[in-house]
Amino acid sequence: MDYIMHIVVVGSGIVGSSVAYECAKAGARVTIFDSGRLAGGASAVSFAWTNATTKTPRSYFALNVAGMRAHLELKRDFGDVPWFVQTGSLEWRTTAPGLSQQREEFKQLQEWGYAVEWIDENDLARIEPDIDVSAVGGAPVAYYPEEGWVDPVLYSASLLRKASARWNTIVRLNQPVAAVETHNGQVKGVRTAPGELVAADVVINCTGSFSDRALGSVPAVPMASTIGVLAFTLPMGLTLRRQFHADDLDVRPDGAGRLMIHKVSVDQTLSEAKQLQPGGDEATTLLEAARRVVPALNSGSIEAIRTTVRPVPRDGYTCAGPMPDVAGYYAVVTHSGVTLAPFLGRAMADEIIRGKMRQELETFRPARFFAPDSGFGRRKAANAVPA
Ligand SMILES: Cc1cc2nc3c(=O)[nH]c(=O)nc-3n(C[C@H](O)[C@H](O)[C@H](O)COP(=O)(O)OP(=O)(O)OC[C@H]3O[C@@H](n4cnc5c(N)ncnc54)[C@H](O)[C@@H]3O)c2cc1C
């Protein structure tokens, strides 16, 4: 096979897997590294809701809509996308400030052409009989029919398996990259932790929350990552098909009858990712909140609770494109990475291999962190490579 160039992707989460897949499809020889298991970082502990709600300004909203569309476009490549469940989502607010904010967001989303409609309690009871409508308290329910969720690990594994089978992409797991090697301001490749030099024309850093860690002397993206906590119930005799978002509570099916439960306020109690117990305070808080809406959970319990670091660039927005100082060195890191990954993968392949710049990314470039007046300073990180 003749390849246009050799690209090394560092990080096999949903973002790195998407970038690797699209670059391989566009004609590059691709090698992807991960210091751990495939997609075992934030992508393995994600609510994974595909959406563009509460995404402002307009450019960021449009980017997320492009991500949602790109998920559908993958059907063209795969025929079937068993990692994507597009049953829509439900949202209600029970406080006066929450309701007024929801109304404003609803209006804005409609003006921007996003699919959203109001449904009433009767509709809710009919489509989701597991939800106790009294918990909604007569509030209007917004229904977003085009939203869904993804199984990020299955997604990543499927894309990389196809890239390996069709374009000989090499997947190297449990092999940390220690440094990006450069010469005269040009990428030369990567050096693995054991010291092997792997030559490359382009290196793309997709290390998620590790994006601010030093990979040799190349610049790093400043991050303000946060902690995420998810609880998973035992398999329950439920038929819930849609995720719901009610005040400070997010719940969705997670396969085989399990529900996944999330509360932002529980995330905020932790300053670091640590092992939590299924019978611990955090799990109890999550289960009790979900029980108030889904009474069948009264006879259920939490089977697992997981924490991870959620990758968030320092200003909260997506960071994708060439890094300063080093030709051939790129970074792609973002929150909402599940929604955005297929679009970002395609965009990187367009820009790096097809030479077609993507306007959608114009305001989301790494350069914004490195401009003299950015307030971020010129950043070279100094932390160690993750184990
Ligand atoms: C609780 C929670 C809920 C979320 N909910 C949503 C949601 O509803 N919708 C949404 O769109 N997004 C959501 N997100 C965010 C989303 O999950 C992330 O944006 C996305 O998973 C990031 O993917 P990634 O590939 O960039 O990072 P990761 O999945 O973290 O992958 C990075 C990989 O890089 C590897 N790595 C790091 N350093 C090295 C190195 N030196 N060498 C080799 N490999 C390395 C790591 O091992 C890891 O596998 C949520 C996140 C959390 C935590």
Image (tube, grey):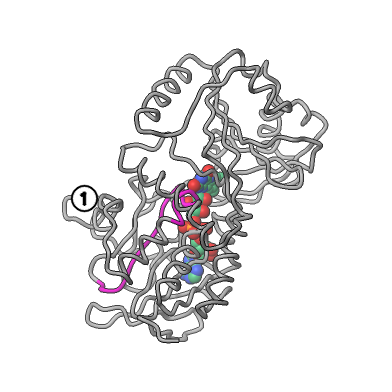
Residue at 35%, 36% in the rendered image: 56
Residue at 49%, 73% in the rendered image: 32
| Residue to which mark 1 is pinned | 374
Q: Is mark 1 within 8 Å of ligand 1?
A: no
Kindly give the residue lying farthest to the left in the view shown: 372
Q: Is residue 340 magenta?
A: yes
Q: Position of residue 69 (x, y in %)?
A: 45, 48
The answer to whether residue 167 is seen in the rendering is yes
Crowd class of label 1 (few under 14; some 14 to 19; many from 20; radius 10 Å)? few
Seen from the viewer's position, the closer of residues 245 and 111 is: 111
Q: Position of residue 74 (x, y in %)?
A: 51, 58
As drawn, is 58 to the left or to the right of 139?
left
Seen from the viewer's position, the closer of residues 264 and 268 is: 264
As drawn, is 144 to the left or to the right of 322?
right
Q: Is residue 338 magenta?
A: yes
Q: Position of residue 113 (x, y in %)?
A: 38, 33
Seen from the viewer's position, the closer of residues 108 and 320 is: 108
Quarter of the image with the C terminus in it:
bottom right
In the rendered image, the vertical position of residue 174 relative to residue 318, given as above or below: below
Quarter of the image with the N terminus in it:
bottom left
As drawn, is 148 to the left or to the right of 323?
right
In the rendered image, the vertical position of residue 158 relative to residue 231, given as above or below: below
Seen from the viewer's position, the closer of residues 126 and 138 is: 126
Quadrant of the rendered image containing residue 38: bottom right
Residue kind at label 1, given as amino acid type: Ser
Tell me which segment is drawn in magenta. Answer: 326-342
Residue at 41%, 86% in the rendered image: 2
Q: Position of residue 133 (x, y in %)?
A: 67, 18
